[in-house]
Amino acid sequence: MSILNSWGQHSQQCVEHIFELSQSQTHQRETVIIGGGISGILTALRLSRVPGKLERGITLLESAPTLGGRLFFSAPQNAQALSRSEMFLKRLEHCRTGKAGGFGFESLGNEAAQSIERHLRSALSDEELQFVDLFISEAQTETDNESRTTFFVKKGLIPFSEAIGNSSELLTRKEAEILSGLLRDTPQEYASVESKLSWQEAPTWKTLTNAQKDSLQPFLETLVAKGILEYNEHTAKKHLDEFSRAINNPTHASFRRTSGFELACELILRSRGIEVLTSTKLVRLVSPQNHSFELTATNAAERKELQITASSVVIAAPLISCIPFLPREFLSGNQAKNILRNPPSSLVVAEYADFGTFREPEVCAPLKPGDKVLFTTERIQGTINRAGSLLLFSFLNYEESLQAESVRETVGRIRRAANRVLVADALKSTAGRTLVHMNTGIKERLVLMPVARQFENPAVPLREVRMGVKGLYSCGDNFSFDIAPWKNIVQSVHDVISILSKES
Ligand SMILES: Cc1cc2nc3c(=O)[nH]c(=O)nc-3n(C[C@H](O)[C@H](O)[C@H](O)COP(=O)(O)OP(=O)(O)OC[C@H]3O[C@@H](n4cnc5c(N)ncnc54)[C@H](O)[C@@H]3O)c2cc1C
């Protein structure tokens, strides 16, 4: 009977027991997976079901304190002195009590969330499925089934449906009609319009009057990203369609921050006997005889260095972020080209904690967790998460995000937007500067992270999972996607598992 069965009555002991059991004694492993995001979790779940693999040793290395990857970045826990199991329990408590910050899967499109969940679940046994359901049900105290509302923020809040359905202080009746027409377009309607023209050169845009163009452009740039009119018309409309399908969907239950789905996955991996080394970063990867790998990883909190030998290594993180430890010759020709040609986009995010206390009461009265806010003057989108933080964000072209000036400009727009919904003068003390803590008591956390969102020319996904040396594989979204990165994750994990299964 699985150790997971004691979940519920003795959850803390269950966690401690599982963490004790999953301490490995040897550092000679058959497979090491680098990265504990969705790709790494799915790879570990699938690989451990291939006969013989688990017995010969699987290790998962993750540099962050808990699994989950890009979607689960969260406020630092100041928990350096904690053991891994204590850290896990603290994180779980944060999730359950709604204190875990960051986006979580709340920002994930519903189709992506459902598909990822289906794939993760399909790698679980019946007992593990029962455990996951129980684990998630513990978080179901919140009432999150009501639909989310999206508001434009001007002097007050204007519900999205009102603004695009009628004349308002934002748009004339005609402009509202044009915008809602664009949002109603379905992919089938424009699929045949494989025009090479940018949107601003296309007849649909050119026939508008200058006044209409001036009014609509800020909306389109807010709903998608700055520069949308320079994209190919077809691509631009696909992004708009994504937006309009996403705004009214309630968050998929398993993927709310409070659910802690990633934590349930970590317990399952550990209970199967996979060695999960969180807070452990791979810093060196060599293949001395070209048939096995020597890995050096560090645990900064414990000031420990770890040496592992492995026959196969699966990199479950975007290759571009692995350049610090990945020798150039370890990349295949296509992978090297792909990294150069398809840089990711960058997402600039500011998280304002305790929004309930600091929000401008008159403007923000109707806002509740899960709602979205759109600031067309600043071209900023935002959301209020379960932890009660306001998250404001904007996408930047990757090259631009390497320039401090562009990032400063984006942070400036974010702060101007924040000023509209926070109590008067809340951010005044930091205007134009990059301070994180404000003497008004508001905490602001800035994050710049690469995301798989290539707005202009969606790249052809990198299908190649074999790398430049034998036994080295790569999976994940690799920042190269059409509009759904999860498809690349699932396909690449599937390919890696097929190859590794044949090798057993
Ligand atoms: C705001 C936002 C919205 C999104 N919306 C969607 C959407 O609607 N649909 C969709 O399909 N996708 C969406 N995505 C993209 C989706 O989040 C990613 O495709 C997915 O999270 C990638 O998972 P991954 O495991 O491949 O990579 P990651 O999540 O990046 O995981 C890689 C892991 O590797 C670890 N790592 C890296 N280097 C090392 C090292 N040297 N040693 C040890 N560990 C290391 C990292 O810490 C990380 O945890 C969105 C992303 C964001 C941020």
Image (cartoon, grey):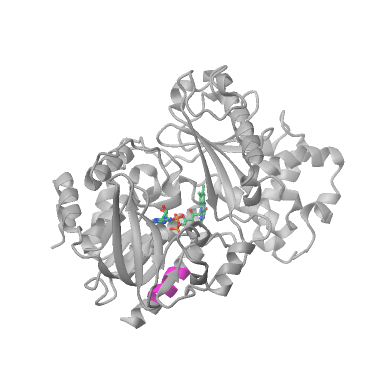
Task: Identify the residue shown where x is 56% and y is 19%.
Answer: 429
Which quadrant of the figure contains the N terminus? bottom left
Q: Which residues are magenta?
A: 491-498
495 within the magenta span: yes
Q: Is residue 337 left or right of residue 125?
A: right
Q: How far across and down, in percent of the image, does residue 96 sit?
A: 30, 39
385 within the magenta span: no
Q: How far across and down, in percent of the image, does residue 163 sit?
A: 67, 35
Residue 502 shows up from this direction: yes
Task: Identify the residue shown where x is 23% and y is 42%.
Answer: 86
Height in image: 177 above or below 475? Answer: above
Q: How far across and down, in percent of the image, does residue 7 sit?
A: 18, 50
Q: Is residue 306 left or right of residue 191?
A: left
Task: Identify the residue shown where x is 43% and y is 31%.
Answer: 388
Height in image: 27 above or below 4? Answer: below
Height in image: 488 above or below 371? Answer: below
Q: In front: 361, or 470?
A: 470
